[in-house]
Amino acid sequence: MASVFKPLEWALGRFSVDMGIDLGTANTLVCVRGRGIILNEPSVVAVKKGTNEVLLDGMAVGHTAKAMLGKVPGSIEAIRPLRNGVIADFEVTERMLRYFITKVHEGRQWVKPQVVISVPVGITAVERRAVIHSAERAGARRVFLIDEPMAAGIGVQLPVTEPRGSLIVDIGGGTTEIAVLALAGAVVATSLRIAGDEMDEAIVNYMRRQHNLAIGEQSAERIKLTIGSAWPMAQELSMEVKGRDTISGLPRRTVVTSIEIREALSDPLRQICEATRSILEEAPPEISADLVESGVTLVGGGALLLGISEMISDYLGIPAKVADDPLTAVARGCGVFLDKLDVFSRVLSTEDDD
């Protein structure tokens, strides 16, 4: 890590816009020192089919590309280049990163930024190198990787450097990251490939099975955000849903209730609870004693699901709370690392460490 603090690095750092990136399956967020979160866009790219050539000089990236999902003509393909938190399409990921880095770096061509990127727990050395190389080719001067739970813990100001345990559950788009943190490291951790995407898929399957209605991913996400819940509500909700009748093949609308959607989400939520319980069972007894008081901290987009803290607390028998602004926790944590690389260097990795 000594090279980070060489005079040349210090000089370059004065002119570059160094950034922390939460490179998520569903969304990419970028945090800049002193400015906070300045970019939050879907991890989606629209390309010419068969060529991986990004449309309109990068304009079809993020929000614009997401609006195309499920609606593009045969010559265009809207791609989500990350699956389960790791790169599934290297070329498109590199193009997407270049677009985001250039946008945040405000066109500075003569100096490249230093970047901290969060990654799921337990990804392979090959997958780590793929993230680093993609970011370097996209215009980063130097790339560091940090496990998502640690970044989230720092982002919500948990005492992760102290000799006491903190349990964090990060429910993202492609993975749920679960870890017990202490002394700037993960005591026990796991990455579960059950998260927001699987919740959306569960709603799609429920609508097809119970209502004979075919809907898309974006419609399922809207249902989840509007009336989805993990715990009974004081006043249950309902909404109108439009899609294609699976029997007649014609457009149709129907009404679904929050009770139905809670039933649809019950299986992925149960798996998240079971995985969290397994982590607690692996934790050393002294750490478990800490968690009786501190409980579970929930972050990520999935933490916004109504009643999820009540459900997890009921299942585990310890307190559970949703962190403030849970969606940006990982990106904010990456931003803190940029300021404290010397303190957190042992939980960061670069290509040199592989």
Image (spheres, rainbow, N blue to C red):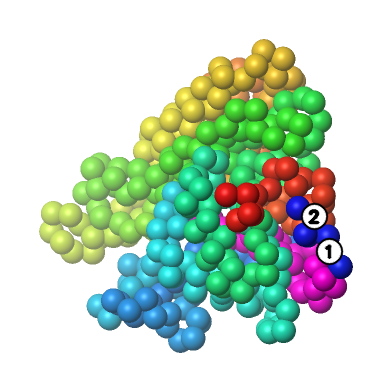
| Left/right of residue 231 with respect to residue 348 in the rendered view | left
Give amino acid for label 2.
Answer: Ala
Q: How many numbered dots are placed on residues in this image?
A: 2
Q: Secondary structure at mark 2?
A: helix
Return the residue at label 2. Answer: 2
Q: Position of residue 250 (x, y in %)?
A: 18, 64
Of the pair 256 and 45, the residue shown nearer to us: 45
Q: Secondary structure at mark 1?
A: loop
Q: Is residue 258 visible?
A: no
Q: Position of residue 253 (x, y in %)?
A: 29, 58
Eyeballing the image, is 55 above or below 201? Answer: below
Label 2 neighbour load within 10 Å: few <14, some 14-19, many 20+? few
| Left/right of residue 152 with respect to residue 238 in the rendered view | right
- Which image quadrant for residue 116? bottom right
Q: What residue is at 57 percent from the left and 66 percent from the top?
A: 135
Eyeballing the image, is 329 above or below 61? Answer: above
Question: Residue reaching furthest top?
Answer: 285
Highlighted magenta segment, given as a residue range: 8-33
Return the residue at label 1. Answer: 6
Q: Cβ–Cβ below 8 Å for labels 2 and 1?
A: yes
Q: Position of residue 243 (x, y in %)?
A: 28, 60
